[in-house]
Image: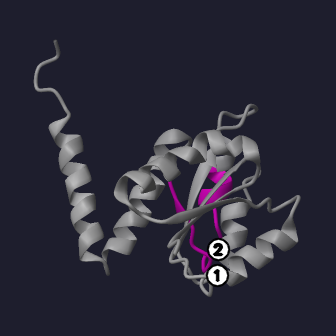
Amino acid sequence: MAHVGIIMGSTSDWETMRHAAETLDALGVAYEAKVVSAHRTPQRLYDYATGAADRGLKVIVAGAGGAAHLPGMAASMTHLPVLGVPVESKALKGMDSLLSIAQMPGGIPVGTLAIGKAGAINAALLAAAILALGDPALSQRLQDWRRAQTDGVATDPA
C-alpha cells in the first residue's frame, strides 16, 4: 500500500518529481504518482486530496510550477502533511513557484522545499523521515542512506 502520494500539475513536472520517486524507491517507501492539476482538473484534485487518508496515504508531496496552487489547495482539503516542491518555470526560474507555495495563509501549512531536483529529493527524504517516526525499519534505512551519502564524500579534492 502506498504511504506517499506524489502529485504534480502536469506531465512535464515529472522531470522534476521523478527524483522524489527515485529517492523513495531507494528507501523502499511505497508511493503513488499522479497528475493532478489545481487549475485544469479541480475535481480530480478535490477527490484526490479528500480521499488521500482513506486510501492509506500518510504524506503528500506536491510539485507545481508557475502559480503553483496545487500544494496549497491539496493542504486545504486534507489533514495529512503536504510537502511542496516548486518546479522551475520558464518565466521566473521557479521563484514564482517558490513564493506561491511558501506564502500560505496561517492555518493551511505546506512544508516548502527548494526549487527543482534538490527540492524533490529533499521532499522524499522528509516524507520518509515523517513515516520513519512510526517505522523502525524505515528509520534504519534512512540512517543507512544518510551514512552512505556521508561516506561518499571524498576527503581530498583530487
Relative to 30, does residue 79 appear above or below in the rendering? below
Secondary structure state at the residue bearing disc 1: loop
Q: In this view, does 2 lie to the left or right of 24?
A: right
- Per the model, the C-alpha gap separating discs 1 and 2 is 5 Å
Q: Position of residue 19 (x, y in %)?
A: 51, 44
Q: In this view, which residue lies farthest toward the front?
A: 1
The amino acid type found where label 1 is placed reads Thr
Q: Mark 1–mark 2 contact, CB under 8 Å?
A: yes
* Res 115 → quadrant: top right
Residue 142 is left or right of residue 128, and the answer is left
Rate crowding at label 1 as few (under 14), some (14 to 19) or many (20 or more) other CA atoms within 10 Å.
Answer: some
Q: Give the range drawn in magenta.
A: 98-113
Q: Residue at x 38, y 73 (%)?
A: 131
Q: Can residue 20 be seen in this view?
A: yes
Determine if residue 77 is in view.
no
Identity of the residue drawn at 58% across and 52% down: 85
**Residue at image coords 78%, 78%:** 47
Quadrant of the rendering where the C terminus is positioned: top left
Q: Mark 2 points at which residue?
A: 75
Which image quadrant for residue 90? Answer: top right
Q: Which mark is residue 78?
A: 1
- Mark 2: which amino acid? Ala
What colour scheme was applied to this rendering of the protein? one colour
Front in this rendered view, residue 90 or 62: 62
Q: Nearer the viewer, residue 141 or 67?
A: 141
The image quadrant of residue 44 is: bottom right
Determine whether the residue tagged by mark 2 lies in a helix, strand or loop. helix
Residue in the image at 18% along x and 49% along y: 147
